[in-house]
Structures are given as C-alpha cells and as structure tokens.
Image (cartoon, rainbow, N blue to C red):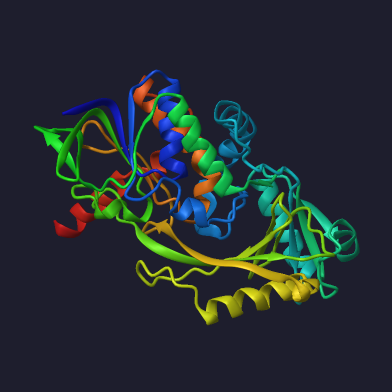
Amino acid sequence: MKTFDAAIAGGGLIGAAIAFELARAGLQVALFDRQQPGEGSSWAAAGILSPAPENSGMISTVPLGRASLQLYPEFGAAVEEISGQKAGYRARGTVEALFSSDPQEKLSTIIALHHGLGLKAEPLSAEDAREMEPALSPELEAAVFRPDEACVDNRALTKAVVAAAERSGVKLFATSNVQSIAKDGGRCNGFVVDGEKIQSHWTIVAAGCHSAEIEGAAHYAPVRPAKGQMIALRAKDLSIERVLWSDHIYLVPRNDGRILAGATVEYVGFDKNVTAGGVQKIIAAALQLAPALADAQIEETWAGLRPDSPDHLPIIGPTDLDGLLIATGHFRSGILLAPITAQLIREWITTQNVSQDWARFSPMRFSEVARATNS
C-alpha cells in the first residue's frame, strides 16, 4: 500500500499549487489526476487576475482575491525558478469599458464600490481610455482603469507549477481515477484509486467540476460544470497591452501576441463542444469592444468546464471528517485564487491556523443545509 503525508485528487492549477506548497513544507505528497495534469479548466481559462466582484454575490470573495493577487509575484517567481519555465505573468492592469446610457452614474458607482472594497480604480474619459488602449471602440462612453490587476498565461503557469511540484518531490500519478475517499473509523485516511487503497494522513479533494463524482465527497463539494467557450485571435496591426473588460466580453493579451476573447457561461453538463452560437456571441461582443479585431485571424477555439458551487463561491477548508479537506468550486476565479488556496490549505495542515478568514467558504455550509432540509 502506498502511503503519503498528503494525497490530492486533481492535478489542475489548484491541486498542483497545493501539492507544491505542501512539498515545500516538507510533506510527502501524492497528486492524482484522471487525465494528464493541467488539461481541465486550468488549461481552458483566460488567466485574468482580478479580485473585483462581477456581481454583489461575489463581494465576499474580494478579501481572498486581494490576498491572492498580492501573492502572485512571489508565487510566480518561485514556480519559475524551480521549474525553469515561464508563467507569462503581465502586471499591466485592466481597462473596464462603459457603454451605458448614463456612463457617469455607472462610473461613479463602480469607483465608489471598488474604493469601498479596498481596490484601486481610476475614472477615465473615453478619450483617455482610447489613448491608453487605441483598440477600444469609438462608441465608448467612459472607462475605469484598475491598475493593480494582472493576467497570466494559465496554460504555461499550470505546466510550470506541475513541474515545480515534481521537482519539489511530489509524486505525480496521471490517468489515475480517484473513485472514493477512504475512511478508518471516524477519520479519512486516503483515497481508493483505480481499486487500490492509497493511505494518507491528509486527504484533499481538488478535482474541479469532477469533485462531486468522488464517492464520499459530493455533500461537501456539490459542484457542477459551467461551460465556457473561448476564442484566440491574432491581429497583425493591433496591439492590446492590458486586459479589456466590458459587461459582455473580456479580451486578454498574451505575450506571444495572441488575444483571448471570452467567455460564455453554460450549464450543459460535461459537454465541451464549441458551438456556432457560442462563437457568434463572443465575436459580436469582442467587435463591439474593439472593432479593429474584425480583421483578426481566429487561431483557436475551445471550451472548458469551470467548477461551480450552488452559491457560486469557492469551497475551501476542512470537513467534519477528520483529515479530509476540500479545495474546489472556484468557478471563474480559479486562476486568481490558486496561490491563496494553496497557502491556506498548507497553513491548516501544518499549523491548524490560517491567515485569512475562510469560514464563509467552508465545505460544511452544504452539509448544514442538507441536514436542515432533511430535519
């Protein structure tokens, strides 16, 4: 029987970052993935690093997002140094474009909200925004510049984190199906993987939208897949330096010259097909934001499956089953929240204390709801 200090289900960015953190803390770690590590939602994402809430329901994640964004330079540097690979980190900010009929009122609201949450945000006139990013539409009414935000090449980063984890001593098991958690009395002591018992003192479920398929984990991690379609464009005579954002689209520049456009949010099970309707929706919104992209070449289309929880908030922390922790449900913020998620799991395992208040994201919130419903 294989025995480890910690066993992790899920080799995406979240799972690999946790493995990397735990290995650097001196633990013997095993990382299991149902396919090749990093081929799930971590591969399909856009890589935006923004703690700004997309809606009022996401405000509770802002402190976590701010903390993770602050960790990114050090996290990325450590990963690059140990792996010998680049992560494509770009700290050039975000420009949020406003097209509303009353742009000044919306601008004032956004600025006040961001400042109230401790986030930097600067108002821009339409002219100043287009001077900063000439690709922006002439129909633009106003804009917000969020200078502290960044983006990262999530495919390169995930590959680098997996490599850094392996170089730090993590044992990687690809194409390994984690079937269930394993119990010994009232304690979780590992997984059953392809019929084999893997013993561990700490057991972490970080399998993205597949977390609920692991027997024994579903009521702690009731996640479902949220499909997101994406397009990669390349324009010969168009340069975008910062992330561009509107109510309907985001455009993310890559260091290789590509511009990513996305993304849809669809609840269609585990379907990852790219559809004509999805592509049309993305292109229409992209051209509204940056009309010069009409001449851009479509280099790639793809879809990924984000792990979404019932309240759209992350699921991070210990359960009432001793030894079992959950790290999933990050929805549209998995790339941003990877460093802080890994740090918090490592802190809990090594000290039983954490540096951030994570009570709102506890896996136990779903078990408590289930008990209340059944009582």
Could you tell me how many numbered marks the image carries? 0
Percent x, y of residue 346 = 41, 27
Assign the C terminus to one quadrant of the image: bottom left
In the displayed structure, 370 sits above or below 246; it is above
**Residue at 26% across, 25% down:** 4
- For the point 54% across and 56% down, the residue is 45
- 129 over 91 or under it: above or below: below
Give whichever of 259, 246 is nearer the camera.
259
Left or right of 96: which side holds 179? Answer: left
Residue 182 visible here: yes
The location of residue 267, given as percent across then percent down, is 40, 70
Q: Quadrant of the N terminus?
A: top left
Residue 131 drawn at (x, y percent): 90, 59
Q: Nearer the viewer, residue 71 or 102?
A: 71
In the rendered view, tell whether residue 51 sits above or below residue 349. Answer: below
Residue pictured at 51% horizontal, 43% vertical: 158
Near-viewer residue (322 or 270)? 270
The answer to which image quadrant residue 91 occupies is: top right
